[in-house]
Amino acid sequence: MGIDPQEIERAAAVLRAGGVVAFPTETVYGLGADASNADAIAKIYALKGRPSDHPVIVHVASSAQLVDWARAISDRAKRLAERFWPGPLTLILKRAPQVLDAVTGGQDTVALRVPAHPVARALLEAFGGGVAAPSANRFGRVSATRAAHVREEFGATVDLVLDGGECEVGIESTIVDVSGTHVALLRPGGVSRAAIEDALGEPLVAPSSAAPRAPGTLKAHYAPSTPLMLVDADVAPELVRSLVRQDKRVAVLSFSTLRPLLPGLVWVAAPADAAGYAHALYANLRALDASRADVIVVEAPPARPEWTAVIDRLTRAAAGAAPPSAP
Ligand code: TXA
Ligand code: MG
């Protein structure tokens, strides 16, 4: 998809004027505002319905801008930036003194990312500064991987939506905390744990209880409004049959081998590879949600490392969706 320089310039002007611009990244669409303008950031929080003490990621055009936002940048942080930026990795670092509390949620750290999507890069270069951007969805809901999803979420309340087509990765960035003694994995995502450990030459640790708060790691998140059940492949067919017997309308996301061939079911074929599954995940959840089923049944992917981020999102979607109504 081509880049329209005039559209990018208009978007940068909206940011400079304290407005909100939705833009594509390679992970998901972001809802962006000038990261040095507290009033502009407040607009994002209001649009999302997100609690104002939640921190937000600052997107910059290049790792040369790290020093504008962070201090005490370790060699390990530099190595990860060099290896994975631009790309689907977010680094948590000690914040520079001038970084707004509206960005950090009042914490001593800041989240930074250099996205790879050409439209995001063009926007960040044209704007020049940092763009604070959470995922472009209402709080706790399914993220947006197409411009049309953003419009579904926010309608005309967003000043400008840049259309960059479908997000390639399809799930959010991996978040790694490099602000402490050990490097901790806060959220699995577009870059695998193995790739990060390989670049570092050391294992990632689990976040300690004193670690920075990351609401994307809330138990319930990324959720459709229809109840969602995540079930093992071997029990899925029987569960679907029994729900149908109870006159429930069932929408199913499953690998092709499982198609129960029951009438009246909405059935979405899940890609068999983890990258393809992640790419399509949020669009699939949105389609299942829109099918007006009583319940969404998702066949759990295999518990292998390359599926970690997808299983993380599905588990939170199941926890966050409305509870199934009593039988
Ligand atoms: O792929 C992504 O990361 C997308 C695109 C738009 O860049 N953004 C995204 O933003 O997923 P959001 O706000 O939906 O999730 C960012 C996560 C949240 O869980 C937030 O709590 C965490 O990053 N976070 C932000 N700043 C943090 C900080 N200083 N310490 C710990 N976690 C932080
Ligand atoms: Mg989000």
Image: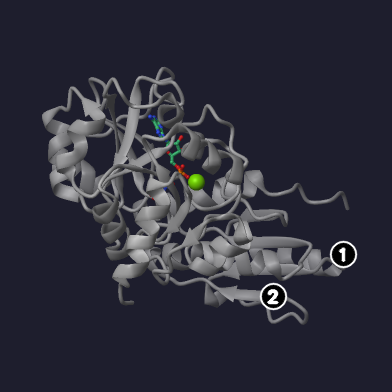
Left or right: 227 in relation to 98:
right
Residue in the image at 59% along x and 45% along y: 48
Q: Amino acid at mark 2?
A: Val
Label 1 and label 2: CA atoms lie apart by: 16 Å
Local crowd size for mark 1, using a 10 Å CA cut-off: few (<14), some (14–19), many (≥20): few
- Look at the image and tell me whether residue 181 can be seen: yes
Residue in the image at 41% along x and 28% along y: 104
User: What count of labels does the image hold?
Assistant: 2
Residue 67 on image: x %, y %: 18, 32
Secondary structure under the numbered disc 1 in the rendered image: loop
The tag on residue 246 is 1
Q: Amino acid at mark 1?
A: Gln
- Look at the image and tell me whether residue 139 can be seen: no
Residue 58 on image: x %, y %: 34, 40
Which of the 4 quarters of the picture holds residue 165?
Answer: bottom left
Q: Nearer the viewer, residue 99 or 9?
A: 9
Q: Is residue 227 above or below residue 41?
A: below
Residue in the image at 24% along x and 24% along y: 182
Q: Nearer the viewer, residue 44 or 115?
A: 44
Q: Is mark 1 within 8 Å of ligand 2?
A: no
Q: Is residue 145 above or below residue 13?
A: below
Residue 101 on image: x %, y %: 43, 24
Left or right: 195 in relation to 92:
left
Residue in the image at 42% along x and 61% along y: 170
The tag on residue 266 is 2
Residue 282 on image: x %, y %: 53, 62
